[in-house]
Image (spheres, rainbow, N blue to C red):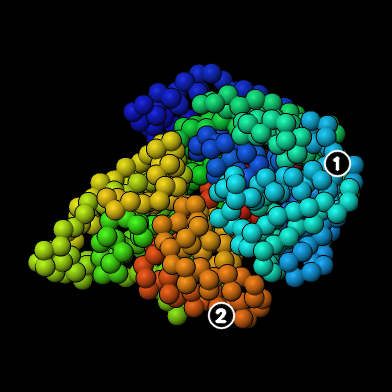
Amino acid sequence: MPRRYLHGSVFGAALALLAAGPANAMGGGGELVIVANQEPQSMQAQVTYKEINGVGLRNVIENLTRIDPDTNEILPMLATSWEQVEPTRWHFTLREGVKFHDGSPMDGEAVAVSINWLWGDENNYSVREMMGPQISAEAVDASTVAVITAAADPLLPRRIYLGGVTSAKQILENPAGHDVHPIGTGPYVFEEWKQGQYWTATANPDWWGNTAEDTYGKIHFDRLRVVWRPEPIVRSAMVESGEAHIAMFLTKEECERFGATDGIKCIVKGSDTFLQFRLDYHGAHPLLADVNFRKAIFTGIDWEGIRQNLMGLGEPLAGQMLPSVATGFDDTISQYPYDPTGAKAIIDEMKANGTEIPSVHISTRLGSTPRNGEMVEAMGAMLTFVGIPNTVAVEEPGIFNPRATTKPDPARAYAWLHVQANPMMDYVATFGAHYSCGGIVSVFCDPDFDARVADAASLVGPERHEALKALVNEGHNRYVVAPVGLLQRAYGVPEGFDWKFGIDHRMVAVNMQMN
């Protein structure tokens, strides 16, 4: 490995990995090793909705539906078919003979328990960001589960793809175990989560996909191991040395180096994940709800410069958080312009009128995306130039996550740079997460806005698009969230490694093999 690319403590860590030698031969069978960018947030079934928070968990926990990686079409998984029997009621026919890894049956009653546990407001799991109208379920019979929504939801089969189906026996008898020991129906059976180091699973000889004609893959590896290293250079070193098959989320520079090195390659693909900047709004320091102050921040940062020069692997977003294929995309708006002179004039006028400008704390989560630390540093420097004091930090999940999910108080002035996926490509999910009074990470609250989102959620076709488009435009003008760019994700792998995946970038081992 060309060591000239390593430096500091990272250099030492990479040398230690090289000295250890390959963990296993890179051939068929054996152990598949994935080097993730961060440790799982938990092993709850709800984490399957966001791959970055639980890398590889979908190998253990499956879903009622799945998305075709080529066509983005909704296809069967644990449900073989579904039907909308009433505007707010869907019946899902379940695959027969499937059992959870604890031996309990995957039947109508078990799936209803799992859905109610996952989507209910009592647990308030973060998957509810993607929910739309409230979801509940009841068994129709052993082979059928009814999913009921509080209002009509034409996107339910796609939305239900986000929620993992987990053992009802565990939920009812050992709910605490659900957080740390996943029990699903998938091609791999969970073995161990050594917190701070790795998690492992073994191939499931009784997986329904071994015999089904409509399976979504084939088991090629005997074991699965997910480890995590926050530094991209260390993740790269593990693939170069034969320690791993996949190094997640490489930088543009690392990808270029992989392309010039024999025996390894870089896979780059567009995603459904965007990078966003979110500033405190309602309930925070009073000035943060002032549209002129927000405008000064949003126009005092060079979003396009950050995207091109620091984000590297990504596509522009036109002043909104989803691309032009999304339902609700507004082609009349564009990225917030970089206008440091205008932003400084706003702040200078506020100061002249005796307004005290609060110090804004800008944070980003360690390992969430390459070079995010450099991005927040650039943002801080730009805001300092226009007269807004600030601090910046790259924070461990244990620090970042609690603040990100805590509602503001009047003393708080906080902003984040973070990633968010929306496989729905529909603005109802985005509004539910970031523009709603009840959103877990939302700091924006306007009951009238919420009501109009709820009305739009029950519509279909052009009517839905136009209703959401108007809300997108309003959110843009109120400076709720600043999109940075739509991420491309890059992975380092050995030559001969095949992996089929869609824009949701799921780490599903049955879609991988070493030739």
- At x 64% / y 50%, what residue is drawn? 120
**What residue did someone put label 2 on?**
466
**What residue did someone put label 1 on?**
98
Can you give x and y, in whole percent of width and height, for residue 166 in the image?
72, 40
Can you give x and y, in whole percent of width and height, for residue 338 in the image?
29, 67
Residue 204 appears in the figure: no
Q: Residue furthest top?
A: 20
Residue 362 appears in the figure: yes
Point out the tag, 2 or 1, that comes first from the N-terminus: 1
- At x 79% / y 43%, what residue is drawn? 110
Can you tell which quarter of the image residue 303 is in?
bottom left
Eyeballing the image, is 101 above or below 412? above
Can you give x and y, in whole percent of width and height, for residue 490 in the image?
53, 48
- At x 28% / y 67%, what residue is drawn? 290
Query: What amino acid is labelled 2 in the image?
Result: Glu
Q: Residue 81 versus residue 486: which sits nearer the camera?
A: 81
What secondary structure is marked by label 1?
loop
Eyeballing the image, is 17 above or below 438? above
Circle 1 packing at 10 Å, graded few (<14), some (14-19), many (20+), is some
Query: How far apart are the two marked residues, 2 and 1, measured between alpha carbons?
Result: 42 Å
